Amino acid sequence: MSISLDQVRHIALLARLEFGDTELEKFASQLNSILQYAEKINELDTESVMPTAHAIPMANVFREDEVKPSLPVEQALQNAPVHNKATFIVPKVAE
C-alpha cells in the first residue's frame, strides 16, 4: 500500500491546510515510510496472542467513601475574604 500525491493533497484539503509541492512530496514519502513500518507488524505471528485493550493489566481503583474527620468550619473559613459563617462567598462568574 502506498499514498499518492493526490491522496496527500486530498487529506490536506480536508484538513484545510495548504502546502507547496515540495512539502506534499515530503509528506507522501513520510506517510509511505510509516505505512511500510506498520506493514511489518503483519509479518508477526499473533495467532496465540490474546486481544487486549491495555498493555498492562488494569484493575478498578475505586474505594468506598469513608467519613473522616475534617477541619472545623470556623478554621476552614478563617482566611476567606468573604464568608457567611457557614460557606465561602465568591464573585459570580456566569450569568
Image (cartoon, grey):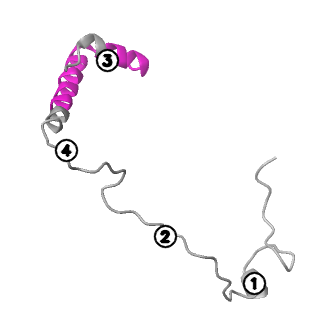
Task: Compare marks 1 and 3 and give the one earlier in the sequence.
Answer: 3
Q: Residue at x 39, y 20 (%)?
A: 17
Task: Compare marks 2 and 1 and give the one earlier in the sequence.
Answer: 2
Q: Which residues are magenta?
A: 8-36
Local secondary structure at mark 2: loop
Mark nearer the viewer, 2 or 4 = 4
Local secondary structure at mark 1: loop
Most foreground residue, 67 or 64: 64
* Residue 58 forms part of the magenta stretch: no
Task: Name the residue carrying label 4.
Answer: 46
Q: Look at the numbered discs 2 and 1 and tell me whether their residues touch, using CB distance below 8 Å.
A: no
Disc 2/disc 3 C-alpha distance (Å): 47 Å
With respect to residue 30, does 19 lie above or below? above
Along the horizontal axis of the image, is 92 left or right of 57? right
Task: Name the residue carrying label 3.
Answer: 19
- Point out which mark residue 61 bears: 2
- The three-letter code of the residue at mark 4 reads Thr
With respect to residue 10, does 27 lie above or below? below
Task: Compare marks 2 and 3 and give the one earlier in the sequence.
Answer: 3
Q: Quadrant of residue 64?
A: bottom right
